Each structure stands twice: as structure tokens, then as C-alpha cells.
Image (spheres, rainbow, N blue to C red):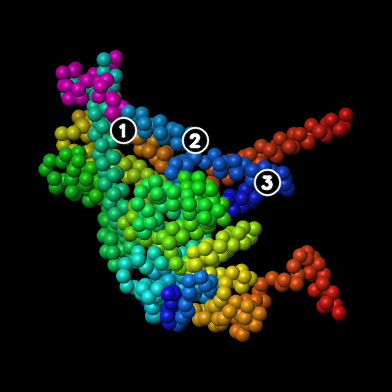
Amino acid sequence: MSDKQATIDLELAPATAPGQVTITDQTVDETAVRRSKRRQFLGIDLPRMDVKLGLGIFLTLSIVLFAVFGRYFTQDPRNYDNPTFSPPSAEHLLGTNNLGADVLAQMAEGARGSLMVGVTAGFIAVVLSLLFGIVAGYLGGFVDEILSLITNIMLVIPGLPLVIVIASYMETRSMWIIALVLGFTSWAGSAVVLRLQAKSLRTRDYVAAAKVAGERTHRIILVEILPNLLPLLAAMFLSAVVLAILSEAGLSFLGLGPSGAITWGTMLNQASQHNAFHVGAWWWFLPPGALIALLGCGLSLINFSIDETINPKLRSAPEAVRAVRKAEKIARRNQRAKAAQRKVVKR
Amino acid sequence: MSLEVDHVTKRFKIRKGFRSSELVAVNDVSFSIQPGQTVALVGESGSGKSTIAKMILRLEQPTLGSIKIDGIDSREGGMRNYRRLVQMVFQDPFASLNPYHSIGHHIERPLRLHKKVSSKQETRERVAELLQRVNLDPDMADRRPHELSGGQRQRVAIARALAPGARYLIADEPVSMLDVSIRLSVLNLLARLQREENLGVLYITHDLATARHFSDEIMVMYKGDVVERGASDDVILNPQHEYTKTLLDAAPEPANHGKLRQEVRDEHLASQAK
């Protein structure tokens, strides 16, 4: 790690400031300082706080807070006593729909629905990919063959069409069933990644050392291997949530979403069925669409930041960029200082 | 009462597409280690040294032959009973400690698994005691591996190997990844612990100088075979096998000790000119 960073610094610094020995020294010092600044939690590198991560957390957190507390500030989303198709006003901040329900209230209820479907499906997907990926990768042999076969079959079945087929077979679809179906159809990709990770981790010396110490297999998987995969699991969970929320919206738009429940997807479906676009009721379809996009954006931004800490190719990238900038800055400062000195000497 | 490796062979199957071939990593090797004795296993990378270590630790199964410790066959009885008797120090101290867990965890687990302690209080005391035995500050129990230097980590690994109260220790190139400046202190620590505990040590290395200094007996391995064995001084001072001679020639010349590279080069050129 330290060697790698040193070589990156040495490779990059001369490219921008040729022949400046002092600058390489400076950048090496900088890496040392920066490494000590890297925050850790239980031995895991935490993502660096920057604009990307900040924006991602802000977007996600605001939507989650809106989902949790929104309903205390809005009316009942199924109260149809209001005037229909009324545009945004002080009384109804996002107007009302064709039945007279308050769109803001429906948005809050829909946020709850979409997030619940997303998180449940994401959780199921991660647990299944853990089961199939890590067990197959760690145990190897016959178990690996069987589990990999199932994973590969799930991998080549196209996800959304399968979900559409399953969903259209069910008479009544509760939110939980939709979440279950989405979770059960989206774990295979992560399982492949986890299997390879587990295959690589099982040959690490600390796993061998745990075996030599007398640890049992399940403890080696749960206590020695799993914690080292936490950042990866977090990233997988977030992308599974995004995928599930988008799939749920897609399903609902097609009319195959949860029946009776309100989600952003069902709102879009209703709006399209009642010609909201042609009527010009933009306040009905724009907010759910925008929030789906913003939530997906926020979760993905968080994911990029996690990726920078777990992907060895990206890990040193921001640091290298910073090192180059720093070197350039110092080079400019040195030049200015020299120029100033020359002036003084001339006088 | 000894660790006995009896005519052990290990073959690996290598599959390349539809073709499969066999690699003989260890070919019919036998030796024994008594408590209090250090045996060095010397050889280049790929000569089968580490495979022998893994087979003794039961991380790999021998294809043929048997390994017995104090009469217990490695394949019989509970894994834990066997591993209570033999422990290992790995080559790379940066890989052999789990980055996620504290130093205390690494030493605590073998203590608990082998029922050496009964209460939390006792565990903490034993961990502190073991850390002190390897010349580390007991406060280090709460630290994580990334905060420690290579030498400190290797001391932790040694403490972990001592925790179950093993009678035999396999040290697989324990200092090859460490800075030269701290190698000797780690080796001296191992030697001291061996005397105190009357351990039988298998010291795997490619460094003939330390092998001679720290062990009673040297075995030289080449491509899976033990090509030469004997008392340390005999093997080093009077090598019989060609490969041992090559190994000795590869080591730096003690006569050039303390000289600058330029001086050595000048002398060489001068002798050529004559």
C-alpha cells in the first residue's frame, strides 16, 4: 500500500514538475499525513467526506426523513374530499389528483412504500447473494458447483421480464410480495462477485491462521471473512435498493405493482391512466418521477464514494490527483519565489 | 515423544483445459523433531518447504505417508486436540493478522478455543501476559494490526502461536518479510521462547546463515526431495550435494564484509588485470 502510493507520487510528480526533488519529498510527506487522516471504523476504511458523498447523503437522508415524518404534516393520502385536479396552492402544495387526493400526502405515503419495497428487496437480495456467493466460494468443490449452477441460471434469466411474468400471475399483490419477488430475482450478480471475493479471502494467511487456532468453519466465514466484506456488502445493498425501487416503479407503471398500496410507481401509473400529461396536471407526475431520480442519484453517489475505498484501482486515485495539484501549486510558488529573488538580486 | 513425518508425499493435480498433469510438491520425506530441538528446512521457493508446513498443520492432506505428534496421527481424533500440540507462525505478518480484528482478539481466540481460560478477567490477564512474553506492551491488545509495524505484528503472531500451549512450532520463513534491522531480535525471541518452553521448532527458511545459527539440524530441500541433511555445521562447512553448494555460493561473501561496493569492484578488476 505504502509502496504503491510512493510509486504513484514518484511517477506523477515529475511529469508535472520535472526535476524538482524538493517536490517529491513534499508529496511523500503529504501521503504520510493523509494516511493518518484516513478515518477508520472497526478497522474498515470509511469513505472520504467530499462533495459527492455529502450530496448523496443529503439527498438520501432528506427523502428518508420525508418518508418517515411527511405524513404528520400532510392530510390523509386517501382523503378524496378536495376539489379534483387543482393546481399547487397554499392549501395543497402539490395540488390534487383526479379523485381529489392531496398529491403531497400521496408523495409522502409513496416514499414510504417505495423505500420499504426497495429496502426489503435489497435486504433479501444481499442475504441470498451472501448465502450463495460466500458459501460457494469458501467451501468450494461440490457445493460450489451446485450453488454456482443455480447462480448462473438466475444470472442469465432476464430480471424484469421474469418479474413481470411472476407478478402478472398473482391475483392480489401486496407490497411485501412485490419486494419478495424483486429480491429473489436480483441477487445473482452480487453472488458472483462475493463468490470470487470469498475464493480470494479463503487463501489469506489470516484465514489459515484462524483454522490453525482451531476455529470452526461457520465462525471463520462469519467472524473472519464477512467483516472484511462489509464495505462491499454496503455498496451491493445500496445498488440493490436502487434497482428494486426502479423495478418497482417500472412494474407499477405497467399496472403490475402492489394493489391497494401507494408507491411512486403507482402514482405514475394513475397519472398516466388519467391523462395527467394531456390535461396539463404536471404536479401529479413530475414530483414522483423527480424523487425516484433523486433517490437513485443520491444512493449512487454514496456508492461511488464507497467504491473509492474498496476498489484498489480507485483507492489511490483521488490522492494521486491531489498530490499532482499540490505539486503544481508548490512548483508555481517556488518559481514565483525564485523570480522575486532574482528581482531583488538585480536591484 | 516427538513430531514424526513418515514417508510423506504430496501430489497436486493440475488441470489445464482437458489435460491434467501431476506436480510432486513433496516426495517421500521423513524426519522427526524432538522437544527442545530446532530443525531448519532450507530450500528455494517452490521446493516444497511450505507444503510440508501446511501438511503438518493439517491445512493440506498428504497424498501418501503419515504425520504423528506424540503418537497422535494427524488424521485421527479431533482436529483441535491435534492442533493443541502444534502451532504455526506464518511468513507474512501483514497477511496473517485479520485487519478487522484487534490484537487482543487474535490471542484471545486460541485461548478460548483450547479452554485455557475460564473467565473474562482471566482472558485479559493471559493476553497481557502473552504480549509481555513477546516483548510487547500489554496495552497493545486494543490496537488493530494496521497500527503496528511488521516486527510487532510478527511478535503478535508468535504470541498467538504460544497461546494454545503447543509443544511444537512451525515457523515458515518468520523473518523474511521483516526489515533486516529487526530480524535478529525476532529470531532471538523465538530462540528464547523455545528454551523456556522446551519447544520443538521447524524453522523454514532460505537463509543459510540464520539456519546455521539457530538450528541443531539442517535439511536441504530441492524440488520436493530432501537432498541433504545433517548437523548444522556439517551441512554448512562441508556440503555434499551440488544444490547445497549453489545455495552457499549465492550467499554474500563474508570476506567482503564492511567493504564498499566500489572497493570490491576495484579489487576484482585488479585481480583480473594480473
Q: Is residue A209 left or right of residue B47?
A: left
Taking the spot 21% from the left edge, 47% from the top edge, the residue there is A181
One can see residue A286 in this view: no
Task: Tell me the CA gap for discs 2 and 3.
Answer: 25 Å
**Chain under disc 3:** A
- Amino acid type for the residue under numbered disc 2: Asp
Magenta-highlighted residues: A66-90
What residue would you read off at disc 1? A289
Q: Secondary structure at mark 3?
A: helix
Taking the spot 48% from the left edge, 36% from the top edge, the residue there is A49
Say which label, 2 or 1, has the lower sequence index. 2
Query: Where in the figure is residue A21, as x and y percent of width and height?
Result: 72, 47
Q: Examine the structure image and report whether residue A24 is included in the region drawn in magenta.
A: no
What residue would you read off at disc 2? A50
Crowding around mark 2 (Cα neighbors within 10 Å: few <14, some 14 to 19, many 20+) is: few
What residue would you read off at disc 3? A24
Q: Nearer the viewer, mark 1 or mark 3?
A: 3
Taking the spot 24% from the left edge, 34% from the top edge, the residue there is A113
